[in-house]
Image (cartoon, helix red, strand yellow):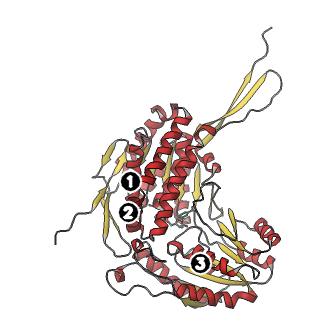
Amino acid sequence: MNRQSPTLIPTVCGNTIITDASDGIGQTFDPATGQVVAEFARAGQQEVDLAVSAARKAFDEGPWGRMRPFERGRVLMRIAELITERREELVRLECADSGKPLRDAHWEVDCSARFFEFYAGATDKLHGNSIPLGPDWSDWTVKDAIGVSLHIIPWNYPFQLIARGVAPALAAGCSVIIKPSAETPVTAYEFMKICQDAGLPEGQVNLVNGRGSVAGDMLARHRGVDQITFTGSVETGQSVLAAAATHAVPCSMELGGKSAQILFADADLDRALPIIASGVFTHCGQVCNAGTRLVVERNIHNSVVDRLQAMIGDMSMGAGIDDPDLGPLINLGHKKDVDAFYEIAREEGELILGAETPKTEPLSNGAFVRPALVTGAGNETRIAREEIFGPILTVIPFDGAEDAARIANDSPFGLVAGVHTTNVDAALAMSERLRVGQVWVNSFAVGLDVEFPFGGYKLSGFGREKGLEALAAYQQVKNICVHHPLPR
Ligand code: NAD
């Protein structure tokens, strides 16, 4: 059989495209079938140095920082247009590389275009403040770009999370280095081509492919990097913080979650239950803000479990490109980790399994797992406390609103929460009490939401992505103070 050799994704430092990088060649696989999607050039110290020096040169000497802000905005808007023009191609690549269902990949690409539109409009509104010091003094602040900004990206939303960080960084005037996950390098390279086609100056965005423990660590330690935006697991985030501490640069940390969805008995269940299910089963549960703990008022617990059980029984499963309810997990190694949690759930409570995994080839080779509910496991159990990153919903009953708030807040994480009720007083009072970065009322993690801030309390991280708040990570405030008495 005459098989085509897989595409080779390079590392890109300024205008230099490197296909034979010093850490060899890696491969990325379609998690639905196990087939190779692409190969990629794994960077080592040499390529890391080249990427940092290209980004440094672009920031220190390049045209981006000297352009008028609205001109930068026009380039960002052009990136948004090109993403939209190439939507279907990007969606198909992302489906194969990450395994996600088609509709989720469409959302991901559309959301990425929205980030560039949003921050394109922000470039000429990055105002400072005027500070009154009294007669003969003028004092004001300006927002300087922070410099070379490193973006370390996870595999669950590879394209969208590039856009989420890179768009505000470019809007603020920074130059950027992107380090994609070794699981999902494909669309990052397409993003590079889009940036070039949009007219972004040389070295303004650079791409370093490779292993996290090699290229990622070298980048995080590199003295030419001025700021780090990390999205990923708590454990890796801690390593990146330690590396950043070696040269004392600021970090924005977007880490994991174990988010609660609180369901009061007075909620409109026909509306709430599909929202709750989508909040946990989207992308097979591989979402940082998945609502994986359902904290439900005790008198409706059993009927809610029955209804959810019927829903997970009906879910379809398959390759992302066929747009099922559930695609595969990212790889067989992660499937093993998630499988271990089914055993933990059996020990700690009752495990209710939903849809069957595909039984015929090629999908039977894929990283599929069944959606599940867990009942009878208290909030102190591992299944209720640890981030699983799989399609498992733990259902925990509550007695009264104070109890619901206590359970929701009793978690090492604090990313988001959902509140489902028709009682406005209860929704507002609960929103105030929850120790999380974002509260959804009668909704949960929906839409092309680029406008409002997103980020965690506690182990879920610090710093904020999205909205105008995100710009702060890429700026530093300079104060200018002038004494100007009238000449005698
Ligand atoms: P991960 O922590 O394994 O990897 C994230 C990135 O870090 C990858 O690019 C990886 O190559 C790199 N990396 C690994 N070791 C490194 C090191 N020593 N130094 C520098 N970089 C290193 O995470 P993952 O498995 O790719 O993604 C899943 C995790 O991401 C989950 O915990 C999820 O909650 C989190 N996540 C958070 C958000 C958010 O916005 N809060 C969004 C998406 C995913």
| Closer to the camera in the image, 273 or 396 | 273
Residue 421 against residue 481 in the figure, above or below:
below
Question: What SS does tag 1 mark?
Answer: helix
- Residue 277 is labelled as 3
Residue 417 quadrant: bottom right
The disc, 2 or 1, on the residue closer to the chain's N-terminal end is 2
Say few, some or many: other residues with alpha carbon within 10 Å of mark 1 (under 14 / 14 to 19 / 20 or more): some
User: Residue at 73% across / 77% down in the picture?
Assistant: 407
Tell me the CA gap for discs 2 and 1: 10 Å
User: Residue at 68% across / 85% down in the picture?
Assistant: 378
User: Residue at 39% across / 85% down in the picture?
Assistant: 358
- Residue 27 is labelled as none
Question: What SS does tag 2 mark?
Answer: helix
The disc, 3 or 1, on the residue closer to the chain's N-terminal end is 1
Label 3 with label 1: CB-CB less than 8 Å: no
The disc, 3 or 2, on the residue closer to the chain's N-terminal end is 2
